Amino acid sequence: MDSEYAHGTRSRLFTPLSIAAYVTWGAITFTSAPFGRLGRAEPAAWLGIAALVAMIALFIALAARAFEPGRHRVGRIAAVMAQGLLVLVAQATLGGGAVAILLIIVAAQLFTMMPVGWATAVLLMLNAGLLALWRTRGFDAGELVLSLLPMLGFQAFAALTSMYAERSERRGDALAELNAELRATQRLLEESTRSDERLRLSRELHDVAGHKLTALKLHLRALHRDPALSSREELAISLQLADELLADIRAVVSELRQHDGIELGDALAALARPLPGVRVELHGRDDARVASVAQAEALLRFAQEGLTNALRHGQATRIDLRVENAEGRLRLGIDDDGGGRMPIIEGNGLRGMRERLAAFGGTLTIEQRAPRGLSFRAELPTRAATAGATA
């Protein structure tokens, strides 16, 4: 699990936008570093380099999600604003105009974490500080404005690009979730149809064919008791074939009734869709059998809610769905390696899950996992499902 989490962290650290930020930071730092002053151990020069290093360190921490989205939203915003202040510190101590370009990286992050109005205000304040620093160096006001305008344009471009990229990613995730839900519902409907057909066929065989074969055997036995016919080989063979056919029908009916209920395996597999940077595995698929469509729907919605929490709120890189069916109880577990921590605030989704499960005599439990992540557990009495569905 640690290796899965490390893989997810690496994938987030090396997105195209992150790589562009690293390249930009490296180029600006190399061209702005006053090697002569550093060699003379001037405190201001070393302070400026330290500010640049701290700035990229905060960027990497955010990219690796050291500040968990949702839970540490204020910390994430503070980390981005701190990057902007560190750029100003580096500008003040190192001089030149290249360092200010790093505000483009700050702008790209601000507009993905704050409302547009607040992000714009923060960015304008940082640029006002930059303008004040340039002004203290005796530059002409008109030249300063002309120098700042292209930089503002680049910041706006980076901010809009990152903002629309994030919105596009969210829409893609929402469409993927909807598509997975539709596929799971389709599998559930198909399995429900198959289950109904199996039940109808088993009843037809038992009630119609079985009844008529039993009547046929009774008539054949009556004929067999007739002294004039009892020695006929054809009658003995007919009796034997009737016995064998009735036994075969009973065996087929028993086989069909063994598969009563709803198979959830295909529907759960449809929900456990592949996502970039996330590994979802389903264990115990063959044990995912319940007694009614209503019970199957309750468990399917539980799985969907657990996956959504792990992905959207916990930012998990690995999720395990585990199914156990023993001693008349079905247990469905969802384990993730995300950043969720107990206690959690239960919203309408989780409260709805508790109510759905309780209608069938089931329970929902949520526990903290070690070293990280949450464990969701749904448990239902499989034989009590029909009663719950009709209540």
Image: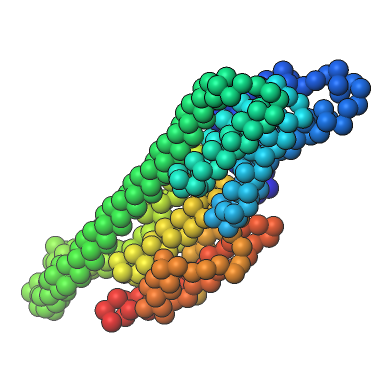
Q: In the picture, which quadrant includes the C terminus?
A: bottom left
**Where residue 19 appears, x then y in whole percent?**
60, 28
Residue 15 in the image: above or below residue 179: above
Task: State the residue in front, 7 or 93.
Answer: 93
Task: State the residue in front, 125 or 51.
Answer: 125
- Residue at horizontal 42%, vertical 41%? 167
Left or right: where does residue 99 sit relative to residue 299? right
- Residue at horizontal 30%, vertical 66%? 293
Q: Quadrant of residue 262?
A: bottom left
Q: How many marks?
A: 0
Residue 174 in the image: above or below residue 13: below
Residue 260 in the image: above or below residue 130: below
- Residue at horizontal 41%, vertical 55%? 268
Q: Quadrant of residue 353?
A: bottom left
The residue at the far right in this view is: 40
**Where residue 282 appears, x then y in whole percent?**
49, 52
Left or right: where does residue 378 sit relative to residue 370? left
Left or right: where does residue 234 sit relative to residue 253? left
- Residue at horizontal 68%, vertical 60%? 370
**Where residue 302 appears, x then y in whole percent?**
42, 64
The residue at the far left in this view is: 228
Regarding residue 225, the answer to whether it shows in the image is yes
Q: Quadrant of residue 234?
A: bottom left
Task: State the residue in front, 390 or 287.
Answer: 390
**Where residue 131 appears, x then y in whole percent?**
61, 31
Coloring basis for residues: rainbow
Regarding residue 224, the answer to whether it shows in the image is no
